[in-house]
Amino acid sequence: MKTIHALGSKRIRSSTWTRVLLLLLGSSLLVSPTAWAQTESSRASQNTAFASAQSWYFRTRTTGYAYTTAPKDAVNEETKHFEFYQYLDGAVSGFAQGKLDLRLSGRFADDFAFRANPTTPYRLYSAYLQAHLSRRGRLRLGRLFVQEGVANYTMDGLYLALKPTPRLKLRAWGGARSPYNMEWEASNLSDETALGAHAIALLTPWMNLGVDWAYLEHNGARAYQKVGAEASLRPTPGLRTILRAHYETESEQWDQAELLAWYRPTPGWPMLNVQYLDRRQSVEKNTYWERFLPSLDRVRLARASARYENAEEWGLEVEYFGSFVDEFEQTRLGGAVLFPYGRLGYSVRLGDAGEESRWFGDLRWRPLSWWNLSGGAMLSTYALLKDAPEDFERDLVTLYARSVTRLRDGLNLHLEFQSLDNPQYSKDLRFLVGIDLAMGRGASSTGLGTGGWLQ
């Protein structure tokens, strides 16, 4: 209640986004009575047209997260927390004669143990209206996540996607980058300008090529201007590779180069994954950390893994990960045995940033068709220095037990208990309770009806 009161008193009356969302919701509600008033014959004729199909879904997750911590020193007392999270996610598609879609997702949160809320009390992840210009184009307006080439952020603005030919895709966007904490208020366009474009050409059935450009301002000054290129290749059956390269025009440096590869020639073979990344360390412009940028070296990351599992759910997985910064390096090697009810594994981390030896395991069991149980443990011995003496080693033990009950279609109950034994706390116990609700309706003339837990 505290979160809702604060939201109502401080944000809803002043939020531009709230007024926009209410207008969009109102327009969607105005469409439904019109659809209900149509005759049976007109509904039947509309069902044959793509533009008349409507659908909707709505999901919500309510989570209570209680935990107790007690430091090992006698100065600080035991601290209790109870955090509340309410996630919302929904969409209405195909209203206004199939030309408009509406998508919303967000979160409310509170910590009832503190007057000063340590978490952001409300977040708006997405809220946009999508217009289908034709079968080859769509336009989005609102808050949306952009992941196109060198761009990877949430933005408040316009996004245009076109497919003028079957072999060419065009993307363009512009607006203001959303606040980092995802608050409801939109950023100032003049301070957080975000622009970009992306083109992808399908040259052959096994080769796609793309070029892109992105421009971003932060606090009114240029944060970066990048150009990029990418290639997606399938030279042989079972092999897929992606090559990417980004160049920063202001500093005149290669921002990053990346190689991704997946190989599995037949279903009976293990899945092989390889990744290599070479990037410069970036720091936001006009921030305190910018002064350290000249002294930062490039980072190189390498990862390779293989996983095999047969029809009886027996298998094996192995992984290598390496991180290299100038003369400093860090390596992690690990593997696990897979069996029908879980896995058991071991990993070791070596290098200049410290060492770690870790055993881990997970178990799962489904006693009933509507009830899933799982649990696991991790035992770790680590040191923050290379070749550290035994007195510098620390132990970390984590345990968890989880129950997921499907009470009925679209209604699930989550229960989870966690216990941590670490050098900082003599007591660290956590308990989570969550309720998931989901409902929806597939494409129809009106999109109205029951689904999920309402059935």
Image (tube, grey):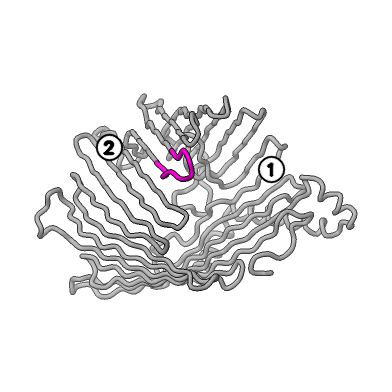
Is residue 65 in sight in this rendering?
no
Q: Which residues are magenta?
A: 263-272
Query: Is 146 in front, or is 185?
Result: 146
Q: At 29% across and 70% down in the image, what residue appears?
A: 428
Q: Position of residue 371 (x, y in %)?
A: 51, 71
> Residue 424, labelled with which disc?
none
User: Residue 268 lies in magenta, yes or no?
Assistant: yes
Image quadrant where residue 21 sits:
bottom right
Q: Is residue 319 left or right of residue 270?
A: left
Q: CA distance from mark 1 to mark 2?
A: 44 Å
Q: Amino acid at mark 2?
A: Arg
Secondary structure category for the residue under label 2? helix
Secondary structure category for the residue under label 1? strand
Q: Amino acid at mark 1?
A: Ala
> Residue 291, labelled with which disc?
2
The residue indicated by pointer 1 is: 131
Does 223 appear above or below 49?
Answer: above
Q: At 38% across and 65% down in the image, what residue appears?
A: 363
